[in-house]
Image (tube, grey):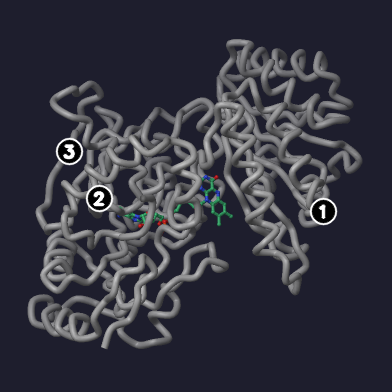
Amino acid sequence: MATTSISGQAVSADAGRRLLDAIARELPDLRLLTDASDREAYRNDETAYLHAGLPLAVALPEAAAEVATLVRLAGEHRVPVVPRGAGSGLSGGAAGIEGGLTIALTRMNRVVEIDRENLVVITQPGILNAELKAAVAAEGLFYAPDPASYEICSIGGNLGTNAGGLCCVKYGQTRDSVLGLEVVLPDGRVIRTGGRNVKDVAGYALTHLFVGSQGTLGIITEATLRLHVAPPPRSTLLAFFPSLSAAGEAVAAIVGSGTHPVTLELLDHETILAVDDAFQLGLERDAAAMLLVESDLPASAAAAELDESVRACEAAGSSSIVRAEDPTEADWLRQARRLALRALERQGTVRMEDVGVPRGRVPQLLVEIQAAADRHGVRVATFGHAGDGNLHPNFIFAHDDPRAAELTETVRDEIFAAALALGGTVTAEHGIGLSRRAALVDQVGPDVIDVMRTIKAALDPLGIMNPGRVI
Ligand SMILES: Cc1cc2nc3c(=O)[nH]c(=O)nc-3n(C[C@H](O)[C@H](O)[C@H](O)COP(=O)(O)OP(=O)(O)OC[C@H]3O[C@@H](n4cnc5c(N)ncnc54)[C@H](O)[C@@H]3O)c2cc1C
């Protein structure tokens, strides 16, 4: 008997049974979930609307050696493997494959070493981003990558997706904080790439190849990450605008001013209302857009940096500007921004997208997003990391709207086309995963896809590692 996997590959039930027997023989102490209700919890990530498969089993290893054995056995029995972190992904990358083996790294969640002298941390992948931040903060240090989901996503998932977040505008994406990795390859070998060196050009940049590959090239079992000495508490301002394009102009002006705010986030009118309703912040409810701008420089330098942003916002026509009175108020405003998706979800079914453009083109992208939604009568709320040129249009539907899936496809395809016409990307941080594969071809073209397939085939000739995702 055979079942069809999400990637179209047939996974034989006999092969699955033989794999489970082999795992029981070679790893008798491994925690392995085979109960249907347990496995069901690993079917989806945060893209529950995608069609995902039920894993044959879910392995919860505690050591790289166990991961290596699992991968080797899966290869021997031709059973696909899905690496999984905390399952908060927004592209279906960790979604189950029918009859496949999901390897969840959540029990490998130990900080191995904090090396203050070299400003690095060595960590296992299953630790949550917020837990790692707290562990290094206790030593007066700062781990920068800061996805809005930082309390519910793992470092392994951040590495798998090359996650972005609220302070990329100053500190870069996850990739910019990675110095070295330990990776279990699809044939079960364990390799180490990079290390503690800040500069290292020995051979191909394999560390950066694995980051963002969404578990299709190997499983990351340890990471050496760059730290900073903890910056001072942030100084924060909110600027409100009468139009989206005015806010977009202010973003372009701040980016072009030569200052380096640590946060430069945009919320449109729908998002302002949703966040204000949810958290009672007293925001300017009739504004078309709001910017959240933050500086993590010492006090007087922060004031000067924010003064520059105030000038840019006023020149772009802001209707009002407020500064947070103290770090607690600033933390609360940032937390409200992080929870924007959850606030929108109180209003219906939300489908979130993730497009990016060169930063000076944010105003045009904002206009194109609204125009595409208006053409099809779809309610859209847009927020995002405007300082990186990265916006998240969120399509909002009534829970029982039967047109949700079809309209999402139509509007997002038009937004993808607009982003590409502006020199942008169909995903800036969430990844191609399952949900954006066709759009990847449109963006990069057949030759680049061919190079990606060649790399995939070289590392994973059996095609067992997260097949059907990315390419
Ligand atoms: C409310 C909300 C806000 C969000 N905000 C942001 C944001 O600001 N920025 C952002 O970038 N994302 C954001 N996300 C998306 C998501 O949180 C990130 O993509 C995150 O990096 C996923 O981490 P995870 O541990 O949940 O990974 P998972 O969803 O479990 O996996 C993600 C991908 O990484 C792969 N993977 C996981 N672990 C490993 C490993 N050890 N080795 C190799 N591959 C691995 C998986 O196969 C999968 O392809 C948000 C999501 C939500 C729900």
> Residue 471: percent from the left, percent from the top?
36, 50
Secondary structure beneath dot 2 equals loop
- Left or right: residue 40 compared with residue 282: left
Q: Is residue 173 above or below residue 70?
A: above
Mark 3 or mark 1, earlier in chain: 3
Secondary structure beneath dot 3 equals strand
> Residue 250: percent from the left, percent from the top?
73, 21
- The residue located at (22%, 72%) in the rendering is 79
Secondary structure beneath dot 1 equals loop
Residue 193: assigned label: 3
Q: CA distance from mark 3 to mark 1?
A: 49 Å
The N terminus sits in image quarter: bottom left
- The residue located at (8%, 76%) in the rendering is 26
> Residue 85: percent from the left, percent from the top?
37, 59
Along the line of sight, the residue nearer the viewer: 412 or 229: 412
Q: Is residue 102 above or below residue 365?
A: below
State yes or no: discs 3 and 1 in contact (Cβ < 8 Å): no
Q: Residues within 10 Å of mark 2 (few under 14, many from 20)?
A: many
| Residue at which label 1 appears | 377
Q: CA distance from mark 1 to mark 2?
A: 41 Å
Q: CA distance from mark 3 to mark 2?
A: 14 Å
Residue 234 appears in the figure = no
Q: Nearer the viewer, mark 3 or mark 2?
A: 2
- Name the amino acid type tagged 2: Leu
Furthest residue toward right? 286
Along the line of sight, the residue nearer the viewer: 336 or 371: 371
Q: Is residue 125 above or below residue 37?
A: above
Q: Is residue 398 above or below residue 375?
A: below
- The residue located at (30%, 30%) in the rendering is 119
| Residue at which label 2 appears | 217
Along the line of sight, the residue nearer the viewer: 16 or 324: 16
